[in-house]
Image: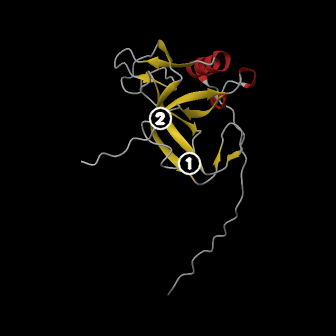
């Protein structure tokens, strides 16, 4: 005897859940320095020497307390990227970033970890590549609010050319 399956009805909806969280002592220091002085600080593990951004009180690898602050350069290397063809909602504004655009992971000079952010480059695989040198572009000082949106985007350093694949 066949059993009747239950019918489930799907109701599409958009849920808006505004949320605030405490940044904590270490991330607050990084965001305050970014907002007030346009500088980016990370922490260095005393054991393995990893320089971590966002800063962590305890090293993710060694599990020892990080207490040494390191100022990072505002330039770095694109370690990976994606060309986005779907809108991405900015978590700080709730507004969509309309595609296509480039979102990338940049390793700032002096850091071990990467920072993910928008890259202001044409979304074309011939115009963006892993290894591209980039720099931080900040909001004007009077517009900074103390979160990652104070970094508008990364922009490629001028005068670069995409390396051509070797033929051997």
Dot 2, crowdedness within 10 Å: few (<14), some or many (≥20)? few
Residue 105 in picture, x, y percent from top left: 49, 37
Considering every residue shown, the one lying at the far right of the view is 142
In the image, residue 2 above or below residue 11: below
Considering every residue shown, the one lying at the far front of the view is 159
Q: Residue at x 51, y 85 (%)?
A: 2
Residue 160: mark = 2
Considering every residue shown, the one lying at the far top of the view is 68
Which badge, 2 or 1, is on the more N-terminal residue?
Answer: 1
Instruction: Tell whether 126 sits left or right of 120.
Output: left
Instruction: Tell whether 133 sits left or right of 143.
Output: left
Q: Determine which quarter of the picture holds residue 46.
A: top left
Residue 26 in picture, x, y percent from top left: 56, 19
For discs 2 and 1, the disc positioned in front in the rendered view: 2
Tag 2 secondary structure:
loop
Q: Residue at x 67, y 50 (%)?
A: 98
Residue 48 in picture, x, y percent from top left: 34, 20
In the image, residue 36 above or below residue 83: above
In the image, residue 58 above or below residue 82: above
Q: Give the camera-side residue of 58 and 86.
A: 86
Residue 63 in picture, x, y percent from top left: 39, 22
Instruction: Tell whether 69 sits left or right of 141.
Output: left
Residue 123: mark = 1
Residue 111: mark = none
Q: CA distance from mark 2 to mark 1?
A: 16 Å
In the image, residue 115 above or below residue 49: below
Q: Residue at x 60, y 54 (%)?
A: 86
Tag 1 secondary structure:
loop
Q: Give the camera-side residue of 66 and 106.
A: 106
């Amino acid at each position: 005897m066949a059993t009747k399956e239950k019918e489930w009805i799907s109701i599409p909806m958009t849920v808006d859940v505004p949320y605030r969280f405490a940044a904590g002592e270490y991330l607050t220091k990084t965001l305050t320095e970014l907002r007030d002085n346009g500088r980016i600080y990370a922490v260095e593990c005393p054991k393995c020497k990893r320089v971590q951004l966002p800063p962590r009180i305890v090293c993710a690898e060694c599990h020892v307390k990080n207490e040494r602050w390191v100022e990072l350069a505002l330039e770095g290397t694109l370690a990976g990227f994606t060309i986005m063809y779907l809108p991405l909602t900015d978590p700080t504004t709730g507004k969509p970033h309309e595609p296509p655009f480039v979102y990338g992971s940049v390793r700032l000079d002096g850091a071990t970890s990467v920072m993910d952010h928008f890259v202001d480059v044409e979304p074309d695989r011939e115009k963006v590549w892993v290894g591209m040198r980039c720099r931080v572009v900040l909001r004007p000082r009077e517009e900074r609010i103390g979160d990652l949106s104070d970094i508008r985007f990364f922009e490629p350093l001028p005068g670069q050319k995409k390396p051509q694949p070797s033929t051997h």
